[in-house]
Image (cartoon, rainbow, N blue to C red):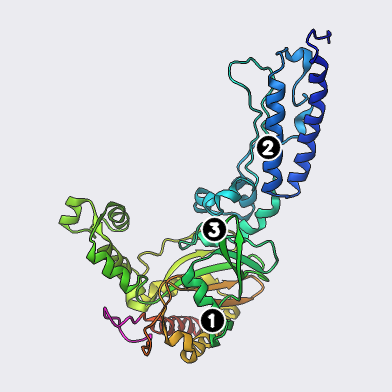
Amino acid sequence: VQPHPHPRGVKRQRATQPCLGRVRSSQQQLGSGLGEFFLNSQRRKWAKDSRRLSKLPARGPDQVGRWLPAAGAHLQQPRRLSTSSLSSTGSSSLLEDSEDDLLSDNESRSRGNVQLEASEDAGQKSHWQKIRTMVNLPVMSPFRKRYSWVQLAGHTGNFKAAGTSGLILKRSSEPERYCLGQLMGDALRGCVPTFHGVVERDGESYLQLQDLLDGFDGPCVLDCKMGVRTYLEEELTKARERPKLRKDMYKKMLAVDPAAPTEEEHAQRAVTKPRYMQWREGISSSTTLGFRIEGIKKADGSCSTDFKTTRSREQVTGVFEEFVQGDMEVLKRYLNRLQQIRDTLEVSEFFRKHEVIGSSLLFVHDHCHRAGVWLIDFGKTTPLPDGQILDHRRPWEEGNREDGYLLGLDNLIGILASLAER
């Protein structure tokens, strides 16, 4: 290399060494999962070095070399995390299409899809090569595999890893925080995930909950939405007071049943929210059986949410038969657990004094015949006025606030009992 006439020419060559060292050392440290704080710090350092170096007189690559040497083939090429961390579970396209929604924006910047570029000042020629490297952060991979089921029934985006074995974080809401706090002192405590308080992550509040999949090997999961309706009476009242035509709900209705909208709704290409909510319950088993199946994740990672029109007792029985795959031990454990839950609900003070809407029963089992059922999701569970209690079996009439939870549980137990007798 010929001596450069500029007095900073030598400094320019020396500067490349610590920069390259930072790239290599940061790759190792980031690969070990130190997280987003370190990543952002290093990104700022790289950008600063890049701006400083790009201001020096430009020289050809044959004179000063590159940021990364030709032998830098050890750096991996960028690739989507979905093809590496989810393919091993055999996940369906459903998960791959929506996987980015599983984590918060802050997490998505630190989970492995990282591209770093050296910036250049405008108007100046530069032969410095832009850095593009892929950093694999394996810390989130087991979480994403285990909790792909959260995509089943509208849970997307609410969960993140707790960093502690046996715990999971769920985005906090005041109604659910209140309910979980009350449930920890109620007879139902053993039927719901244990609540370990509230923590702050990235400026948001999260509920620390028991990891219900902990201890299961390749779990199969089924989400069963309980009750004859999944909307609050207040939601129905507000929607009627301020009627608004919803084109998005019309499209959802049309996708399930093109004949469902009326001629007027077809002409408007929209429906009101009350109309859509009541239609949605009517086409499923919610109104007929008091529950509906929201989604299933199998051990191979495949998921199904195509149960919107699963309405009859025979159809639901077929779904559960397919879910347990002939494992009678698992089926009997499910049945015993449901009977235990029903007995507990009937003596629970919390249950008598709350309208339980939008809550699910989560079924989990694995190939080792382990099986469990828990009540989850209390974001729409609301306390009743003082002195009012619910039967949870009486038919719902607008104003009585009955939710049909026990009606659904009775039917669910009957279906599994008939399946066990076959």
Instruction: Please state which amino acid type lies under the numbered disc 2.
Output: Arg
Task: Decide whether residue 227 is among the magenta residues.
Answer: no
The residue segment tinted magenta is: 392-402
Q: Is residue 396 magenta?
A: yes
Q: Position of residue 320 (x, y in %)?
A: 48, 73
* In this rendering, the label closer to the viewer, 3 or 2: 2
In percent of the image, x 32 and y 75: which residue is there?
287
Q: CA distance from mark 3 to mark 1?
A: 33 Å
Disc 2, SS: helix
- Residue 215 in the figure: left or right of residue 82: right
Residue 311, located in which quarter of the rendered image?
bottom left
Front tag of 3 and 1: 1
Residue 321 seen in render = no
Q: Horizontal and vertical percent for residue 237?
A: 26, 70
Secondary structure beneath dot 3 equals: loop
Mark 3 or mark 1: which comes first in sequence? 1
Residue at the disc numbered 3? 302
Which residue type carries mark 3?
Ser
Report, in whole angstroms, how far the alpha carbon at label 2 lies from the one at label 1: 45 Å
Judging depth in this view, the residue of 63 and 76 nearest the camera is 63
Is 209 above or below relative to 405? above
Residue identified by numbered label 1: 183
Q: Looking at the picture, how far across and down is residue 304, in whole percent? A: 47, 60
- From the image, which quarter does the N terminus lie in? top right
The residue singled out by tag 2 in the image is: 43
Question: Mark 3 or 2 closer to N-term?
Answer: 2
What amino acid is at disc 1? Leu
Q: Earlier in the sequence, mark 2 or mark 1?
A: 2
Specify the quadrant of the image occupied by residue 26.
Answer: top right
